[in-house]
Image (cartoon, helix red, strand yellow):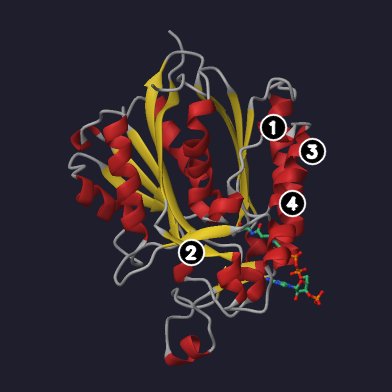
Amino acid sequence: MNKIRAAITGVQGYVPDYVLTNKELETMVDTTDEWITSRTGIKERHILKGEDKGSSVMAIEAVKDLLEKTKTRPEEIDLLICATVTPDMVFPATANIVCDAIGAKNAFSYDLMAACSGFLYAVNTGSKFIETGSCKKVVIVGSDKMSSIVDYTDRSTCIIFGDGAGAVMLEPTTEEVGVMDSILRCDGAGAQHLHMKAGGSRRPASLETVAAREHFVYQEGSAVFKFAVTNMADVSAEIMERNQLNADDVSWLVPHQANKRIIDATANRMGVGSEKVMLNIHRYGNTTSGTLPLCLWDYESQLKKGDNLILAAFGGGFTWGSVWIKWAYDPKQ
Ligand code: UT7
């Protein structure tokens, strides 16, 4: 019998309406459009505005539209995994809130936190439930409201992040398509360079932690940059080597959108030309768990059945990894 694989059978994204441009950032911190564009490739990012709106708001929109697109009834979903570092609350899981809102009454659901690699970790995890036969329909949604944890007085960090969500449906297939291979890694020693100091059990919220601005992303940009360039490129080359894929075999590189220079370095290392690199960092910035599904959503109409996609990410933790996916369907009319 042919091996059961997990195929992506639909993808959907959601970004909130408000657009924060580099020009507007110039009025908030000491920066310029020229600096941001040349150092990161970002021109604008979307921001979720309004009281009482968390990451679930964007995840719900993405998943609702995904169900409509894939003609799936919410009761058919077996599992929903939400990759996020900005859950609505510490608990319950944002995934539980999403399931309730969309009426996924038969699903179990949980959040997965692996920062910018969250979507890759979740696709890998979700695909195992499909491969073992225990689930038939798994929704993976990456959603982050980064604006809720970004310090808009820290010019080197605030300029890169934006809000957004993206979701994919995983279903079983016995064809030679779907999630083919994954390499996932972590190194907790990287926490010193990228973390949020307070709000967890080690340093609960207090007047002192708020005054010290400890509830925001702390990032040593250039240190993170060096690790990201090396590890994202290495792991992408490694997954190609171990599957005997050369640059011609790769139809698309789907890279985490943190910095255009990291993306270029990864593509160079793989020998993949820029025409095969999915890029939307200029429009959305770094949406953390949202970047990879938002890329798939933007490029969906250009994807063909059998295309080899290498997804790659690096982020807080540190976490990083690459996943080889053979695309499972031709562009939908
Ligand atoms: O997705 C999760 C993982 N995160 C990443 O992958 C992010 C990786 N890091 C980066 O993308 C880059 O490090 C940043 C975009 C965050 C920063 O760029 P950089 O080229 O590494 O800048 P830097 O922090 O080394 O700073 C260089 C200079 C400094 O000035 P001096 O000391 O040389 O005079 C900064 O003060 O650029 C200055 N600078 C800015 N200038 C204008 C930093 N931020 C800004 C800014 N506008 N927004």
Q: Nearer the viewer, mark 2 or mark 1?
A: 1
Q: CA distance from mark 3 to mark 4?
A: 11 Å
Q: Position of residue 228 (x, y in %)?
A: 71, 53
Residue 184: quarter of image: top right
Secondary structure found at label 2: helix
Residue at image coords 77%, 57%: 226
Q: Which mark is residue 275?
A: 1
Residue 192's quadrant in the figure? Answer: bottom right
Decide if residue 236 is on the left or right side of residue 302.
Answer: right
Does mark 4 have its CB less than 8 Å from ligand 1?
Answer: yes
The residue under label 4 is 261
Judge whether 52 appears above or below 143 on screen.
Answer: below
Residue sitting at x 37%, y 26%: 171
For label 1, the SS is helix
Look at 70% across and 40% down and name the residue there: 235
Near-viewer residue (303 or 250)? 303
